[in-house]
Amino acid sequence: MFRNRAALPRPTPFKALFLAVTFCLIAYTLVVIGGLVVYPPLPALIESLFSPEIVFAVELSLVTSAVSTAFCVVAAVPVAYSLARLSFPGRNLANTLFNIPLALPPLVAGVALLIFYGPSTFGKMLSASGLDVIYTPLGIVVAQFFVNLPYMVRVARSAFETINPRYEHVARTLGCTEWGAFRQITLPLAKSGLIAGLVITWSKSIGEFGAVLMLAGATRMKTETLPIALFLNMSTGDLDLAVAASVILIVISVISLAVFERYTGGRGVF
Amino acid sequence: MLRIAGLAKRLGDFTLDCVDLTVADGEYFIVLGPTGAGKTILLETLAGIYSPDAGTIALEGRDITRTDPKDRGIGMVYQDYMLFPHLTVGENIGFGLLQRKAEAARIGESVRETAALLGIGHLLERTTGTLSGGEQQRAAIARALVLRPRVLLLDEPLSALDTVTRERLRRELKAIHRATGTTVVHITHHFEDIFALADRVAVMQDGRIVQTGTPDEVFRKPATEFVAAFTGMENVYCGVSRVQNGEATIDLGEIVVRTVTAIEGDVCVGIRPEEVILSRRPFESSAANTFPGTVAEIRQNGMFSRVVVDTGLPFVAVLTRQSVARLGLVEGEPANVTFKASAVHVFRR
């Protein structure tokens, strides 16, 4: 890092201008977000935070995001390892493919999921066997999984890529099976990266709106996650409840960002 | 016995091309070759990390070409050690025994015993990041040796170390080999390793084995231009070094060479052909070594001539054709061999 620590005591017009813009935007961000938190009177905020609707939204968000994150991790680990280590035909294509949902607006992903689980043959088979995805809490999990899997894959892939494959080679000559070498050597070495990925995936699935709205709908007290609660209460003009949902989302973002930085910041992912 | 036949493997830019090698039980076998010759791939294929495109590997009469690495009984030590950073030194060394589900007490005992053999008994509780290069290399060797492998593969084990540590570890490798009797396949691009350690040598170039033999044969009779150029030390002779007042006299049997070295005892000396000066008559100079002899052979080789002068030991010199003509060197006629003390490279046998 080539930080110029002496920037403040002797400001040139150049440094002064750049620092001024920086500090203005810091202030802007703090005022905008802080303004939201302090907008309702405190007793009203607390009352809203413990209203049955917000409590339901928090519970639903926690459960669906935990489940979808767990699925993301379980699915992303083999995918990320394959992309990082194994050579197979179409590997570059696979890399691009897994990145598509990153660039895609979640609304579009949601519509695609809606068609896949709805009128398609697969969707009909699923609902015939009693698994209804559309407009149900299950749909929330499905939408979160689809949109957030690429994030987990990306972080996990870079975690695996930084580990020298020779560690595994040595472990194999020391008597490990492929599974054993992966479990005892690669996974522990990738731990920090995987935890960071898990946290960022979880935080993103809590905040997922577009895809959830499309696939699971916005039914009060049924598929009402925190972002949906925010949306519903805004549209009915119930500002206190909307702010309460926002405040919880802000707190979750800040905490998960801090955890992510802690596990990846500075020393990278191992 | 480790028998490799027709082994071929293509991996990215590196290839192994029809490698045939036989390594006897208990032998210290060195594969010499420049960087990028495919040496590491050879070891990794032997260890079972990669399965070969063609050819077979047999160990003690059993075909292990497709055997899983864990069942081969072959240990591997990488140049960059590859100690597991999330484990202590002791846990690293005991890792293989743990995989075999050995009892904790037995693991501890074997780990201490092997660590003591390598002189790292006091480091078992340390994390690997706090070790010096030499200590890490010892730990990596201990980790492989504790399983008593039938073959130990060493990938440039001395290259990453400083000169002093390298010399010490080289002696230790020799002692370990003697103590354990393990068959060792060691790859290197340092020719010094060969005289200190090898029973036999294979020279590798562009994924092929170009020559196999004892160190003496490979240096004395390089099979190809490449081997000669790569080894670069054609005048290699072994003898006994005696050091007095910082000056060494090395008795090579037929002649006694003077040089400056601290190495005493059984040694080999090497003198590059470019550093050998030929003259018709002895002449006075600062060079410490002058021997009379007879021109045994003159061979044209492009712009240069290779002249062999027999002084009791044959010395190879490289001269321009003009110099050969100017001196009037003729096969069978007398000539003097002269070289400076500093031209004598001494290495331990």
Image (tube, helix red, strand yellow):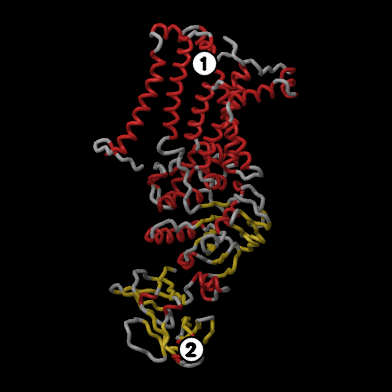
Q: Tell me the residue at 48%/14% (across/down).
A: A245
| Foreground pick, B314 / A237 | A237
Residue A248 image position (x, y, % from top left) = 46, 16
Task: Assign a secondary structure to mark 2.
Answer: strand
Residue B142 image position (x, y, % from top left) = 47, 50
- Residue found at the far front of this picture: A13
Does residue B24 sit above or below B276 in this rendering? above
Which label belongs to residue B295? 2
Does residue B136 sit above or below A49 in this rendering? below
Q: Label 2: few (<14), some or many (≥20) within 10 Å?
A: many
The numbered mark 1 sits on a residue in which chain?
A: A
Q: Tell me the residue at 30%/35% (across/down).
A: A16
Q: Tell me the residue at 39%/42% (across/down).
A: B126
- Where is mark 1, residue-wise? A226
The N terminus of chain A is located in which quarter? Answer: top left
- Residue type at mark 1 is Leu
Q: Are marks 1 and 2 in contact (CB under 8 Å)?
A: no
